[in-house]
Image: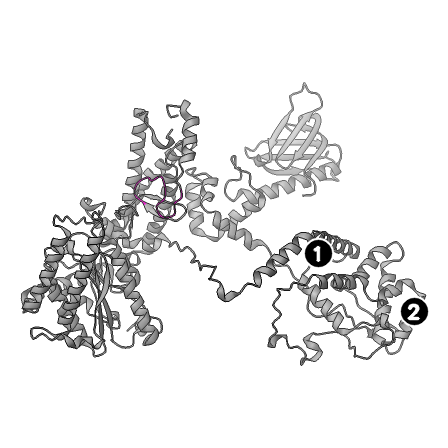
Amino acid sequence: MASRHVTKRAKYKTTIKDPGTPGTLRLTLEKILFVPHNPKSAGKLDVEFRFIKGQKHTKEGSNKPPWLNLTNNQNGSFIFEFENYSDLQYCRDFVGKVLAKSGEVSEKPTVTYPDEQLSAAEMELRIKLLQEDSELQKLHKQFVLSDVLTEAEFWATRKKLLDTEANKKTKQRLGFKSAMISDIRPSTDGRTNKVTFNLTPEIILQIFAEKPAVHRAFLSYVPNKMSEKVFWTKYFRAEYLHSTKNSIAAAAEAAEDEELAVFLKLDDILASEARWKIRRVDPTLDMEADEGDDYTHLPDHGIFRDGSKDMTESQNELYRRTLSQDINRHAAVVLEGRAVDVDLDDTRAVAEALAWSKQESSTKRESDGDTNQERLARVSRMTEIEDLQGPNNLPSAPLCIKDPRDYFDSQQANALRTSGDALGRTEQIKCSLSTQEVYGSLRQSISVIKAMGLKDPIVKPEVAHQVFDALTNSISTTKYHIGKNPHESVLDRLPKKTKDELLHHWTSILELLKHFWASYPITTSYLYTKVNRLKDAISNIYPQLEEIKGSVPSELRHQVSLLVHPMLQALDAAIQHYEADMQKRSTGSVDKPNGYV
Amino acid sequence: MAPAPSKLYADDVSLVVVLLDTNPFFWSSSSLSFSQFLSHVLAFFNAILTLNQLNQVVVIATGYNSCDYIFDSSSDLNRSFENGRMPVMCSSLLQKLEEFLIKDEQFSKEEPDGRIKSSLLSGSLSMALCYIQRVFRSGALHPHPRVPIDSCYIGAQNSAFLQQASYITGGVHHKPQNLDGLFQYLMTIFATDLHSRSFLNLPKPVGVDFRASCFCHKDTIDMGYICSVCLSIFCKHHKKCSTCGSVFGQAQSEVASASDKKRKTPET
């Protein structure tokens, strides 16, 4: 918005009939403030724009006075009478803009964040993420909008998501074209003696970037000494002279016109830059050339170039400009990238912006001492003998944390486990014999078998038959329950709606438990309230899971209850911990380890 | 009918590398005696070799203190142990096994007692995988070998590690119920080659125990503590991570307890 607030004199009327209290109306982006001139009168008003639904106003040209009527959510209205219609117009525009802005935000999740300051860009990012991922949006709606988790908590675990999104937003900047458009070929008119050069802002930018002398001339001559048009005319005159390769004529004209001479001479800024660069060549640069560097066999060295300059000698050294110099300069500028990002139409602005960016880079160069040192250090490092070195970068494997939903349906095994081996302690081999004894017995078995040979028969036929039967039985029953395809899971056999619900419940339970367990040990009152909120949310899930079990046809009910069982186990464990902790607090045990409050 | 994965194996040749657990402490207290076990297993090896001329069996013994190769069907050294009572390969294997056990016992004498009595499974697994890599580098039957790990668990409890390993690598895990018929289990389930597995139905476990094991006791746990630096899992609170050495947040809570000493009762 152009203005952040509006202040106008107006009269505030509560109804149309009300004569109105004169005072000052001040509109900001968030609220409407009306202060009456007479401090004793009661018409003070302080309303937030959030509550304003819409606005109405009287039309100019009608006989009515200039009134602005702002309606709020409760169907009340605030009427302001202005001194004239232009004031009214101004206020109306402002209100319209504010309403439009708040209108588009109010559809999205809550705007007010009492405990964090968010920039508009960050909010937009979050909204975008929510819109793209429906699963995330469902979770967000379920927890944040029902006040189980705050916005800050929800996004605290998703920082990585926000970071990657923010990075994507940085747009790529367009660089210069590699075609040398600054080398303009004029169009000649055969009949008249006119040559016409076409100049676009893009070309102007390139000219300034490639020819610093021209840039400097522009800054100093325009608009003091000559107008832009005259400047460019002279420039193109110089170009024309160059193209005719008539260096004698060029010298002659340069002698006459001082400004023209600037364009005809060699660019001294470039020359000094080149000398500076030569002094600072990095000796560690690897100059290995390969086939890709061979451009000599391509026409025009592989660069599209406007105009045709041939390689004739010219007598006047000062006015000679070679093709290779131009190409090199152009290439260097293209590789540097676009240094300015201003509106190209204003040539003066472009010139200034370019000058400023150059100044910045030259001040950077002034701190040369450090870079020199750094270069020397690098040289000494690189002249080390590589053969005698060990490898110094260890390959790193990126962390791969799998999506827990992939393993969801394989958790049935946990459901089948009885409470007896709920902890799955490793089998402690109870062995009372000494090492010597056990080894001895093992070796004895080997001698036994060596003496006796293999068992005959290896397996008794009825045992084999039993085993075979049992295996076939179990294979066929699991096939019935789980499916033929070993990659198929139980989930796929459920109706889609149930499957989606179950998976959603799984992710939301994980989210809740993540926040729940992270809040222990409870050290602040904030965590205490948070844990209570989460515990209530957890208790609400039990009936929802029961409902899902009930909604499924009876033959699948067993599968679903097996799938749901680990979720219930996890929730039970959480509630257990919560209750144990509550008990500890209420009994007020003094001995609290680890800074428990 | 065959889905795409079966095309990986064009024929039914197998290279079976067997990790034989020879932990003496386990075998001395097991219901199945070691000699009975050996006879099932040796017959199984023989049977694999008869299924296809090009099949190869390599046996690595997983001991209490060391691991070593005790049998390779492709080597020619098997001829020297003639014994009329059993096939030649069996006698050579048994000889090597005996030598291995003697050596393993020697290591025990040097080490102090009191270690958890578990076998060196990870060591023999690494040896097996390196062997397989070497064979495929020089041979090249298949450009990218997929190495499924099958596990046959004999014992009272369950091994979460073996279940997970078999699940993730695409192998089959089974715990035989009737140990008298061990050979039958081995033949039905574990002698199948990878090509045939695409159309054979092997027993699938109802579910895999994906629970992690704690780093301190090797117990499988549902809930525990995790080091935020190296992601090591512990079942109870420790002062320091044993893997990466990072100190766990004592300082913070100490500060909190100092400042909150005034508030004894929680706010309700």
Q: Quadrant of residue A59?
A: top right
Q: Quadrant of residue B81?
A: bottom left
- B243 and B158: which one is in front? B243
- A485 and A390: which one is in front? A390
Residue at (71% x, 39% y) in the render: A90
- Above-or-below relation of B109 to A320: above
Q: Which mark is residue A253?
A: 2
- Above-or-below relation of A223 to B41: above
**Type of amino acid at the residue the image marks with label 1:** Val
Q: Quadrant of residue A190?
A: bottom right
Magenta span covers which residues? Answer: B234-246
In this picture, residue A146 sits left or right of residue B116: right
**Type of amino acid at the residue the image marks with label 2:** Glu
Q: Magenta stretch containing residue A503, yes or no?
A: no
Residue A568: x and y in percent read 28, 44
Chain-order first, disc 1 or disc 2: 2
Residue indicated by mark 1:
A340
Q: What's the CA distance linking mark 1 and mark 2?
A: 34 Å
Residue A519: x and y in percent read 39, 37
Q: How many marks?
A: 2
Report helix, strand or loop for mark 1: loop
- A265 and A39: which one is in front? A265
In front: label 1 or label 2? 2
Residue at (57% x, 54% y) in the render: A169
Chain ID of residue with mark 2:
A
Report helix, strand or loop for mark 2: helix
- A461 and B56: which one is in front? B56
